[in-house]
Every structure is written in structure tokens, then in C-alpha cells.
Image: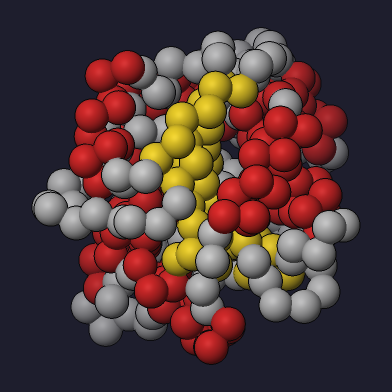
Amino acid sequence: MAHGLLAAGSVMPRLHTEVVGVGRPRFVFLHGLFGRGRNWTQVAADLAATDLPSVLVDLPDHGQSSWTTAFDYTAIADLVAETIGERLGSAARLIVVGHSLGGKVAMLLALRHPHLVSGLGVIDISPADSEAVTSFVPLIDAMRSLDLATLHHRADADAALAGRVPDAAVRGFLLQNLRRRPRWHWQLNLDLLGSSLASIRAWPDPGPLTYPGPVFWLSGEGSSYVLPEHEEAMQEHFPTVRRIVVPDAGHWVQADNPTAVVAALRELAAVAR
């Protein structure tokens, strides 16, 4: 149970989910830091076109899901597992795919709740300390610097961030979290996530647990999140792991080369039972 996410007397966090496709879901997608389930919409739509429906999840403190009082990977994995079981019942045996932060959640979910998982896709993250997460510090500072009270239009926010975040695609990724009603606000729990980077970059020791099912471990050829020294830990917990380096991709593999990601996930679906 996800008690690590709760203050005393609090209500269990609610996770927002969205189904893409028709029929029994085969995949569940977990996004990365500052993302939301809809970041996977195009990949999920491509899979649905070949009769592979998906469930997109907003993780706690992101998107339309509940805010919490602490960041805890293990508790989040248990909460996702509980949500899958409650909402899918007997159909709750899915290929779990997670990117970055969501990849660590996906790995823990498979290790702790293997009965729910027919296959695992880990996208550009390792079961290790992720030093590259420190690259989010200037992005957090930029978001915090935005004077929401003076905004009139979303374009104002984009212009205000441009000096600190020159990449338009990254600004767009951040600004997906900006909402206007009843007034301009960050939909994600920026204060909690910004203060939890040490926990987000860490990997909680799952002990001797292993997941025996098929595991595809995708990494961008230009990313620093997956390193050779991470392979031993990956093989220790996931003995059937298959490493796939995706060309023309950095950390946001599914955005940089969605065609390769969809092809790999279709192959994973063919072997996951």
C-alpha cells in the first residue's frame, strides 16, 4: 500500500488514467518527471492501430492525479499496482512501460507485483543513482521564477521562460503543466518535486527480488542515463533483459525516435504472455 505518500488521516491518492484503443489493454505507460500520461498518446495510438490498446497514467503530483506529501518510489509503484488491479480486474496483466522516473516505478512494480506484469519496457533509466537528474535543477528554477500573477496569456509564459530555457521543445514540455483556471497555476506539485530531486535521482534497494519475464531496456544513443556500469544491476534484477540502443535519440527516446520505440514495443508484445 502507498502509505509512504500520505500524511496522517489523508485520503489515498487518486491516479488519473486514460485508455487509448479498444478492447483489453496490453500496455500501461508511465511518464517521466514533469510529464503526464498524454506524453505517450502518439506511441499508444500507433500501438492501438495494430490492436494493442494502452492505459496512460498520470503519476502522483503530475497531471490530473492527486498531490501527495512525500516522494517515495516504492509507494508509487504499489499505488500504480493497486490502481491497475482495481480498474482492470481480471485483465490486470499488462506490459508496463516507463520512461525515466516512470521507468524506475515500472521496474519496482514488476519486482514487487510480478503477477500484474506480462512484460517490462524500461526507457532510458537504470536501477541506479541517476546523476543526470541534476539537469532538471535549472528547469525547476526557471519554472519557479515565473511570476504567475502577471501572466495574461500562455505566450507570455513562453516568452518569460525563453531566457532561461532556450529550447522551444523543452519550454513546451514544461508549459504543458501550466493551467489558467481559476487562475494561472502549475498543475504539478512543483514544490514537492523540486525539493525531492535527491529521492528522484536515487534507486531504492529492492533487495533480492527478480522479475523473470521479458524485459526490453531501451536507451537513447545520445543519453547519459544508461551507462555500462548499470548493466550488472539490471541483469541481477531482470535476468532476461535485452538492451536496445535507439539511434538518433537522447533522453526523451519516445519523442526523438517514436518509430523505433513503437517497433520495439510491438516486438515485446509478441513475446510477452
Residue 73, given in percent of the width and then of the height, sits at 31, 53
**Display coloring:** secondary structure
Relative to the observer, which residue lies in front, 5 or 131? 131
Position of residue 232 relative to residue 77, above or below, is above
Residue at point 20%, 46% (across, down): 204
Position of residue 10 relative to residue 271, above or below, is below
Residue at point 28%, 65% (across, down): 112
Quadrant location, the C terminus: bottom right
Position of residue 142 relative to residue 28, above or below, is above
Residue 127, given in percent of the width and then of the height, sits at 29, 37
Relative to the observer, which residue lies in front, 248 or 61? 248
Residue 62 visible here: no
Where, by quadrant of the figure, is residue 255 drawn?
Answer: top right
Quadrant location, the N terminus: bottom left
As drawn, is 67 to the left or to the right of 187?
left
Residue 103, given in percent of the width and then of the height, sits at 45, 45
Relative to the observer, which residue lies in front, 133 or 7? 133
Position of residue 117 relative to residue 50, above or below, is below
Q: Which residue is the extreme one toward the left?
A: 207
Residue at point 16%, 47% (across, down): 205
As drawn, is 25 to the left or to the right of 102?
right
Where, by quadrant of the figure, is residue 16 drawn?
Answer: bottom right
Residue 108 visible here: yes
Relative to the observer, which residue lies in front, 177 or 33? 33
Residue 121, given in percent of the width and then of the height, sits at 51, 46
Residue at point 62%, 29% (across, down): 253
As drawn, is 200 to the left or to the right of 16?
left
